[in-house]
Amino acid sequence: MSWSGTVTCSHCYTTGHNRRKCPDYTAMVLRRYKDNLGYAEDKDGDIDHYTRTAERYRLEYMKRTKIDPATGEKVKNKTAKAERMKKVTCGYCQETGHTRRICEVVKRDKLVFIEESRRVRVGVLADARETGIGVGSMIPIRTHGYNSSGEWGTHTSLRYVKSVDWYTVTSGSAGLWVHHIVASKLASANQSRWTSRDKIVKMQENFKEACNYAEGMSQSEPTASLIPSLDPPDGWLDCAPSTIDVASAFPTTGNRHNKQRGHSYAWPSGVTAEVIRDLGLEEHWEGRF
């Protein structure tokens, strides 16, 4: 719209209408439909190209006029949309005829992802509880970085387990991560400087390393004060919606490869295939595993 408030068409530059209502543009679409249809019928050149191009102009003409140029008959909005949808390609499964928003394939894959994640969480929690490490535990570990005196290198550092990253555990991210801080810095105003993040089983390995180091250096064996407090949030073991970020596992932004279906779901094997069978969904993967 110009400064005077008058609409100007971006196609014919005539005032009083826009491109959507432009009769010249509509006539051009019809003309190009007929031209490409004629080229295809003449069988001169790339017939498939002319046929596809003619169909594209046919659908555009139907959208603008609600008339099918192939028959000259009026079509309903629902019919015109159905015709257009035949050419739509789903951004997830790459099949035509629907969009990602109503894709049944992505809905099924999400069900599989949630069940896979549920099984992973059961196993991860069992493994973590076997370590005896939980929130409030004090554990000496061998670690590389700054010690409590601000000296850089590899040291035996007494760590206090502050918190657990429960919600990061999914089928694609097994292992329970915890945040731990240098015990002597618990009262520090800048705790982030002294805080690290590791898997619980890794902390257990680092504790054993600290014990082996002390033995090799003829030092007294370091001791840990373990508090096995690992109580997941309500619904965590069942992968309740509030405890799992399904959207991040099936992104709708980024490049085309990030958004489309992954190989592990298109051609499942191992645990994924087992979950599909257990959910009774194998008919939708016929011949794929």
Image: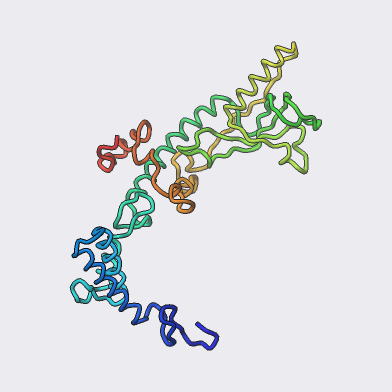
The image quadrant that residue 61 belongs to is bottom left
Give left or right: position of 280 versus 195. left
User: How far across and how far down the image is residue 118, in percent?
Assistant: 43, 38
- Report the residue at 34% width, 82% height from top: 23
- Report the residue at 49% width, 52% height from top: 254
User: How far across and how far down the image is residue 70, in percent?
Assistant: 20, 71
Q: How many marks?
A: 0
Observer able to see residue 1: yes
Give left or right: position of 181 versus 150. left
* Residue 165 against residue 14 in the figure, above or below: above
User: How far across and how far down the image is residue 88, in percent?
Assistant: 32, 59
The image quadrant that residue 80 belongs to is bottom left
The image quadrant that residue 223 belongs to is top right
- Report the residue at 72% width, 15% height from top: 214
* Residue 149 against residue 257 in the figure, above or below: above
User: How far across and how far down the image is residue 6, in percent?
Assistant: 48, 87
Q: 213 or 84: nearer the eye?
A: 84
* Residue 123 against residue 235 in the figure, above or below: above
Colour setup of the view = rainbow
* The C terminus: image quadrant: top left
Give left or right: position of 283 versus 265. left
Observer able to see residue 78: no
- Report the residue at 30% width, 62% height from top: 85
Q: 288 or 8: nearer the eye?
A: 8
Q: Residue lying farthest right?
A: 149
